[in-house]
Image (cartoon, rainbow, N blue to C red):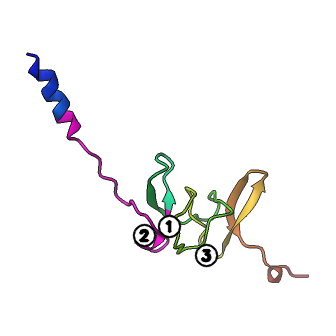
Amino acid sequence: MRCAPLLLLLLSAGDAAVITGACDRDLQCGGGMCCAVSLWIRSLRMCTPMSDLGEECHPLSNKVPFLGRRMHHTCPCLPNLACLRISPSRFKCLPEFRNEDVFF
């Protein structure tokens, strides 16, 4: 009877998780994605879609492809969007304001 708990322990130790989309650099991800830090496991980087209109962003996110290792959990905004401040500590991807957009 004493062998049963040991056997269960050995069986449960054999389970493992496979993480799909894990990466180390942007070049390992498909188009429209970057290799961002996971929200749940800081040592893990995942292929993440670039931020779209209205989504949160980080103003210091590097453009894609970035040859180094990203330090934030969000990707930069899609082309033609900019990471703009909406409150003292929040940023969102919004259309980039340009002088030629203003008509008098």
Q: Secondary structure at mark 3?
A: loop
Q: Main secondary structure of the magenta part?
A: loop
Residue 5, disc: none
The residue wearing badge 2 is 29
Figure quadrant of the N terminus: top left
Tag 1 near tag 3, CB within 8 Å: no
Residue at the (46%, 68%) spot, across then down: 25
Kind of residue sitting beneath label 1: Cys
Counting from the top left corner in percent of width and height, residue 43 is at 46, 51
Q: Is 3 displayed left or right of 82 in the figure?
A: left
Asked if the residues shown at circle 1 and circle 2 are in contact, with their CB atoms under 8 angstroms apart, the answer is yes
Q: Which mark is residue 34?
A: 1
- Nearer the observer: mark 1 or 3; the answer is 1
Q: Tell me the CA gap for discs 1 and 2.
A: 6 Å
The residue located at (22%, 36%) in the rendering is 13
The range drawn in magenta is 11-35
Residue on which the image places disc 3: 79
Residue at image coords 56%, 63%: 75
Marks 3 and 2 sit apart, C-alpha to C-alpha, by: 17 Å
| Numbered disc 2: secondary structure | loop
Whichever of labels 1 and 2 marks the residue nearer the N terminus, that label is: 2
Q: Few, some or many C-alpha atoms within 10 Å of disc 2 (few <14, some 14-19, many ≥20)?
A: some
Callout 3 crowding tier (Cα within 10 Å): few <14, some 14–19, many ≥20: some
Residue positioned most to the top: 1
- Give the total number of marks visible in the rendering: 3
The vertical placement of 25 against 74, above or below, is: below
Q: Amino acid at mark 2?
A: Cys
- Residue drawn at x 61%, y 75% is 79
Q: Which residue is at the far right?
A: 104
